[in-house]
Image (cartoon, rainbow, N blue to C red):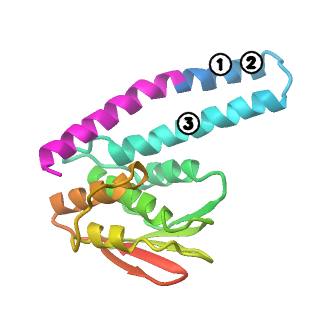
Amino acid sequence: MTDHTANVAALIGSRICHDLISPVGAVTNGLELLAMSGVGDSPELSLVNSSAADASARIRLFRLAFGTASDGQSTSCDELQRVLADHYADGRINLRFHPTEDPSRKIAKAVVLAVLCVEQSLPVGGVIDISADGDSWNITGTSERIRERAPLWAGLQGDAPLDDLAPADVQFLLLRVLLESLDRRGAVASTTEKVSLTF
């Protein structure tokens, strides 16, 4: 993937998220107005409300992961933690966020992509710890069962090609390209109960 292709992909991601966030927000606002007007709570309304909240959380996470990130932009730790926490609010993944220093927008993008990569190794759920030591970031997933993703991890580290990816695995290629643009390299360590990605 060339830098130009990556930039085009990011622009497309930003455009899609931008165009979707308004109608999803309108649905959420409409549900709030229904609740204020005295419409009784019902299983149907709860389902729509939950689905709208989930869609909004996904769009915000996807905008950060797959959208544009320019030099000089930053993202607050609070925003990064909130976006991730909202996305994993269903409880299947327990997120632990430790950093306190605000990262650049590109590093925040890398963190979200890395979390999405690690999540792929936790098919039955688990815990994802996000920590930073100076300029180095670590995303570690622990679970009672780790899904083997050796070819993808090798591709992310630059030790193998990332060809014929499934749509669910595109974050591995995008993270590799992003890290290369930042003069970084992902390092992965994996056991039967833990997978750790450092960059």
Amino acid beneath label 1: Gly
Residue 75 on image: x %, y %: 35, 49
Q: CA distance from mark 3 to mark 2?
A: 19 Å
Residue 66 on image: x %, y %: 34, 44
Residue 86 visible from this viewpoint: yes
Secondary element type, mark 3: helix
Give the total number of marks visible in the rendering: 3
The residue depicted at 74 percent of the width and 18 percent of the height is: 34
Magenta range? 1-23
User: Vertical placement of 72 versus 94: above or below?
Assistant: above
Residue beneath disc 1: 30
Pick whichever of labels 1 and 3 is earlier in the sequence: 1
Residue beneath disc 3: 55
Secondary element type, mark 2: helix
Pick whichever of labels 3 and 2 is earlier in the sequence: 2
Residue beneath disc 2: 34
Amino acid beneath label 3: Ala
